[in-house]
Image (cartoon, rainbow, N blue to C red):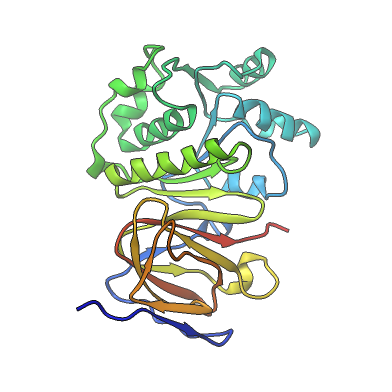
């Protein structure tokens, strides 16, 4: 017999203990120190209202997806610091990349990898490049050799068990709605195959990432670390399939709570756990947490 769903309103501060078997997620780790196998992927939208320098310094690999290189160049040109922040790679079909931007970055050591296939987005090509880079020294070395220009990256074999990368995605959300949904869908697809990877969309307003099926513990130094006034607002979004939720550390905790598009969705909730919150979900799902760089 199904257990009855419950909603529990909590006080604004709650001590939450991390379960021993939880999948630990630290969404703000990039603000404190360099992340191990980590990449920053810059997509083709205007950059504003974030600590790009801090994000850059604390990630190891920097990739621009086609026209994302133009956005990066324009951003640092305004600050007269273009030579300090040169991406390691530019990848894509290159239909948006400006010739002068390409020339500048190539002259400063950036590798440009044309991949003209239209059966993968420039974002997906960037994520694949990131995994190739961190899988092994052997596969990394292939990125510095000539690569077939249609879909050569697809010919470099990836072993899911050997790939573990924290990917930070800048400008992946916003703009046209279909592109936003497509970006999230690509992350969901990739996460199903490469389960050891993590993906975080960074926007001026929030951090968006994937919760894995099972028990997740979202760990943070304090609620104030999110840079918001009051408790950081969050939403749990079952974009893939129906999910049953059990939570501890939210303003409105839920127990045995079914959530789906067209059904119940927990939006405009908030973190009240002092240094963490537990979210158990029956399937993978997306969460966004309010965050400000100001």
Of the 4 image quadrants, the one containing the C terminus is bottom right
The answer, for residue 118, to whether it is visible in the render is: yes
Q: As displayed, is residue 164 above or below residue 125?
A: below
Q: Position of residue 174 (x, y in %)?
A: 62, 42
Q: Is residue 67 left or right of residue 182?
A: right
Residue beneath the point at 41% across and 16% down: 117
Residue 35 vs residue 202, the one in the foreground:
202
* Quadrant of the image occupied by residue 246: bottom left
Q: Position of residue 130 (x, y in %)?
A: 41, 35
Q: Position of residue 226 (x, y in %)?
A: 62, 65
Of the 4 image quadrants, the one containing the N terminus is bottom left
Q: As displayed, is residue 10 above or below residue 217?
A: below
Residue beneath the point at 42% across and 77% down: 254
Residue at far front of view: 262
Q: As displayed, is residue 10 above or below residue 102?
A: below
Residue 122 vs residue 31, the one in the foreground:
122
Q: Position of residue 93 (x, y in %)?
A: 50, 17
Residue 29 vs residue 116, the one in the foreground:
116
Q: Is residue 119 left or right of residue 66?
A: left
């Amino acid at each position: 017999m199904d257990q009855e769903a419950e909603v529990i309103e909590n006080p604004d501060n709650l001590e939450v203990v991390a379960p021993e078997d939880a999948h630990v997620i630290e969404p703000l780790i990039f603000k404190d120190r360099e992340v191990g196998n980590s990449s920053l992927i810059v997509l083709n939208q205007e950059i504003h209202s974030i600590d790009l320098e801090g994000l850059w310094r604390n990630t190891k690999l920097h990739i621009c997806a086609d026209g994302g290189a133009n956005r990066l160049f324009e951003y640092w040109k305004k600050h007269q610091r273009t030579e300090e922040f040169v991406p390691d790679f530019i990848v894509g079909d290159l239909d948006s990349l400006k010739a002068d931007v390409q020339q500048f970055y190539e002259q400063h050591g950036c590798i440009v990898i044309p991949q003209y296939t239209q059966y993968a987005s420039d974002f997906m090509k960037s994520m694949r490049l990131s995994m190739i880079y961190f899988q092994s020294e052997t596969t990394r070395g292939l990125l510095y050799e000539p690569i077939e220009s249609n879909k050569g990256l697809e010919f470099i074999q990836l072993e899911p068990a050997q790939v573990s990368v924290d990917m930070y995605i800048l400008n992946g959300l916003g703009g046209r709605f279909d592109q936003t949904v497509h970006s999230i869908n690509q992350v969901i697809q990739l996460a199903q195959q490469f389960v050891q990877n993590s993906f975080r969309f960074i926007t001026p307003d929030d951090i968006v990432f994937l919760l894995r099926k099972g028990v997740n513990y979202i760990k943070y130094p304090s609620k104030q670390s999110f840079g918001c006034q009051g408790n950081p607002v969050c939403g749990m979004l079952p974009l893939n399939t129906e999910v049953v939720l059990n939570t501890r550390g939210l303003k409105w905790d839920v127990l045995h709570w079914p959530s789906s598009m067209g059904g119940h969705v927990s939006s405009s909730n908030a973190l009240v756990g002092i240094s963490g919150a537990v979210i158990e979900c029956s399937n993978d799902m997306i969460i966004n947490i309010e965050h400000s760089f100001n």
